[in-house]
């Protein structure tokens, strides 16, 4: 039986199932000179390169949207009527 590779690509998506080390994990998320997305140090796909300013902008936008969603949910619930309340319907002949 042939040995399977622990690293490679399937349909253009990288994978890496080698045992992770601390050095490889830390260096994978900080790669100056590379793009916004870099190969994951363990697993399938890509991850954010924290050396890229675009990654920080993306994290800031995602954080702002999450904050807005969590803080705005209590205001919208107070404005809307209860779903269990009866509704009066008037039908004229």
Image (spheres, grey):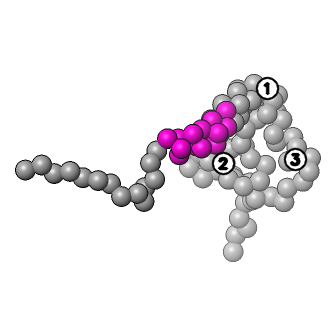
Q: Count neighbours of disc 1 (C-alpha within 10 A) and say few if under 14, some if 14 to 19, many if 20 or more.
A: few
Side of 41 relative to 13 (left or right): right
Residue placed furthest toward the left: 93
Residue 76: x and y in percent read 53, 41
Mark 3 vs 1, N-terminal side? 3
Mark closer to the chain start, 1 or 2: 1
Q: Position of 55 compared to 82: left or right?
A: right
Which residue carries the number 1 mark? 33
Residue displayed at 53% across by 46% down:
77
Q: Residues within 10 Å of mark 2 (few under 14, many from 20)?
A: some
Instruction: Please say whether residue 1 is one of the residues in the magenta stretch.
Output: no
Image position of 22 (left or right of 62): right
Helix, strand or loop at label 3? It is helix
Give residue 58's position: percent from left, percent from top. Answer: 67, 31
Extreme residue in the bottom direction? 1
Q: Where 39 sits versus 32, above or below? A: below
Q: Secondary structure at mark 1?
A: loop
Query: Which residue is at a point 67% across and 33% down the rendered structure image?
Result: 64
Mark 3 vs mark 1, CA separation in Å: 17 Å
* Label of residue 54 in the image: none
Which residue is rendered at x = 79% and y = 26% of the image?
A: 33
Residue 74 colored in magenta in the image: yes
Q: Which mark is residue 45?
A: 2
Q: Main secondary structure of the magenta part?
A: helix
Marks 2 and 3: CB-CB under 8 Å? no
Would you name the residue on which mark 3 appears?
24
Image quadrant where residue 30 sits: top right
The N terminus appears in which quarter of the rendering?
A: bottom right
Residue in the foreground of this view, choosing between 76 and 18: 76
The range drawn in magenta is 64-79
- How far is disc 2 from disc 3 in space, using C-alphas? 16 Å
């Amino acid at each position: 039986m042939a040995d399977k590779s622990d690293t490679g690509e399937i349909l253009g998506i990288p994978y890496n199932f080698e045992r992770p080390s601390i050095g490889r994990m830390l260096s994978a998320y900080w790669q100056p000179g590379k793009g916004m997305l870099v190969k994951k140090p363990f697993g399938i796909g890509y991850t954010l390169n924290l050396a890229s300013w675009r990654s920080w902008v993306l994290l800031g936008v995602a954080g702002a949207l999450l904050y807005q969603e969590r803080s705005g949910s209590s205001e919208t619930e107070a404005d809307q009527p209860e779903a269990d309340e009866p509704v009066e319907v008037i039908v004229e002949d």
